[in-house]
Amino acid sequence: MAAEVIAIASDHAGVDFKESLKTMLSEAGRDVLDLGTNSPDSVDYPDFADALTSAIGDGRAERGVLICGTGIGMSIAANRKPFIRAALCHSATDARFARQHNDANVLILGARTLGIEIARDCLGAFLDTEFEGGRHQRRVDKMSG
Ligand code: RB5
């Protein structure tokens, strides 16, 4: 089976976080699809949310990470697509439950509201936690299609 691809994208506010988290993903042996942005020049977060969610939709990536200043804009934009379950997380506990109970396929982080170490903890929990299924599957199914 092919290795899971993790897509990552940010706006200008999240570009430093993106680089740091990309390094973490590579060091963990993950296949990474970097969808930008790649400079501090101002860009619009919906464009990057769309690029990442499209990559999940067409199968180029299985899961993703989106970063903006607060994570709020990216959350609103990413969750417009019915197959996306994007979770804005502020702790590893948030990220763990987002996987266990919500089967989140996109982790959202705020670069202006989190420290990088918390962000790394969130990413670790997001990557390493499985969906529990069962009663949670029924609830997730009610949001699909
Ligand atoms: C960009 O200044 C900022 O608005 C954006 O990164 C994000 O926080 C939006 O929700």
Image: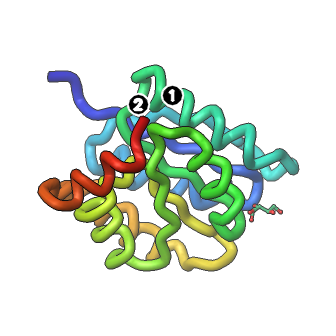
Location of residue 2 in the rendering, given as x and y in whole percent from the top left corner: 21, 23
Can you tell me which quadrant of the image ligand 1 is in?
A: bottom right
Left or right, 111 with respect to 137, comes to right
Task: Confirm if mark 1 falls within 8 A of ligand 1.
Answer: no
- Residue type at numbered disc 2: Ala
Q: Which mark is residue 61?
A: 2
Q: Earlier in the sequence, mark 2 or mark 1?
A: 1
Left or right, 27 with respect to 132, comes to right
Answer few, some or many: residues within 10 Å of disc 2's Cα (few below 14, many 20 plus, some between 14 and 19): many
Q: Residue at x 63, y 64 (%)?
A: 71
Q: Residue at x 23, y 63 (%)?
A: 100
Write down the quadrant of residue 63 in the picture: top left
Residue toward you, 124 or 81: 81
Q: CA distance from mark 2 to mark 1?
A: 6 Å
- The relative height of residue 40 versus residue 38 in the rendered view (above or below) is below
- Residue type at numbered disc 1: Ala
Q: Which mark is residue 99?
A: none
Report if the CB atoms under discs 2 and 1 are less than 8 Å apart: yes
Write down the quadrant of residue 56 in the picture: top left
Q: Secondary structure at mark 1?
A: helix
